[in-house]
Amino acid sequence: MTSAIVSDTTVPARAPWSGVIRAGQTLTVTDLRGNQAVDFLVYDAHDTSVRYSAPDTIHAQGNIFLTTGSVLLSGEHTPLMTVVADTCGRHDTIGGACSRESNTLRYGHHTWGQHACVENFLLEGARHGLAKRDLVSNVNWFMNVPVEADGTLGIVDGISAPGLTVALRAETDVLVLVSNCPQINNPCNGFNPTPVRMLVTGDVAGEESR
């Protein structure tokens, strides 16, 4: 088989995306305009009960940030995807996904009607038979969540820039869910959500992405 572009999608600001990435294929996420957080979940495509585990991933690499060489592990400690290239430098594993509930708690009741990442995950996940019980702590590509000496977390201006990328190789067939974060109440998106690019390359056989 010839290595080629399997799919190439520009995900609009605030929108979800999903795709099945076959073992050996590479997913490259590009921050097209800079300072855009991309919330990310990954499951075994053949058994979605096997899914990304933030605790296992953090423990195995001894670091809360992801970058080149980081392996995204399942709760069974099996590898799902490996970061094979990263021009941003580090990515968040602990900031979580925004929701209507967390927006209300953090920013006030007037934010209740605003779309959020949890809603994106639920909408897109439903296409694959996933529900709220299937959502777990997620990765936030390009999001800057520093940890202070006293353990305080911050959500601050991103360290990304237009055109920066993170590339992940699938170690098995995986289902990826993405929320191109719609958050406008903190600086994770520079208060202005923008599009991102999802490029899948590799063996073109058996491709399935949406």
Image: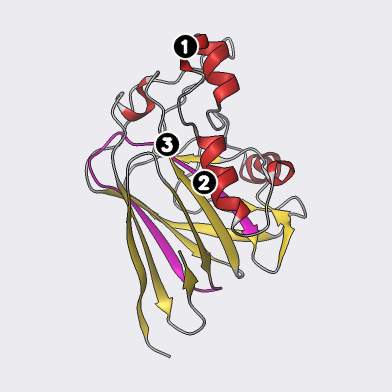
| Amino acid under disc 1 | His
State the residue at coordinates (71%, 46%): 134
Compared across the picture, whether 18 is left or right of 180 comes to right
Question: Which is more foreground, mark 2 or mark 1?
Answer: 1
Q: CA distance from mark 2 to mark 3?
A: 10 Å
Q: CA distance from mark 3 to mark 1?
A: 19 Å
Outermost residue, bottom side = 1
Q: Nearer the viewer, residue 191 or 56?
A: 191
Q: CA distance from mark 2 to mark 1?
A: 27 Å
Neighbours of disc 1 within 10 Å: few (<14), some (14-19), many (20+):
few
Quadrant of the snapshot with the C terminus: bottom left
Which residue was labeled with disc 2?
40
Q: Would you say residue 27 sits in the magenta stretch?
A: yes
| Amino acid under disc 3 | Cys
State the residue at coordinates (47%, 11%): 110
In the rendered structure, which disc, 2 or 1, sits on the residue that comes first in sequence? 2
| Amino acid under disc 2 | Phe
Disc 3, SS: loop
Residue 69 seen: yes
Which residue was labeled with disc 3?
181
Q: Which stretch is magenta? A: 22-43
Which mark identifies residue 110? 1
Q: Is 108 placed above or below 90 here? A: above
Question: Which is more foreground, mark 2 or mark 3?
Answer: 3
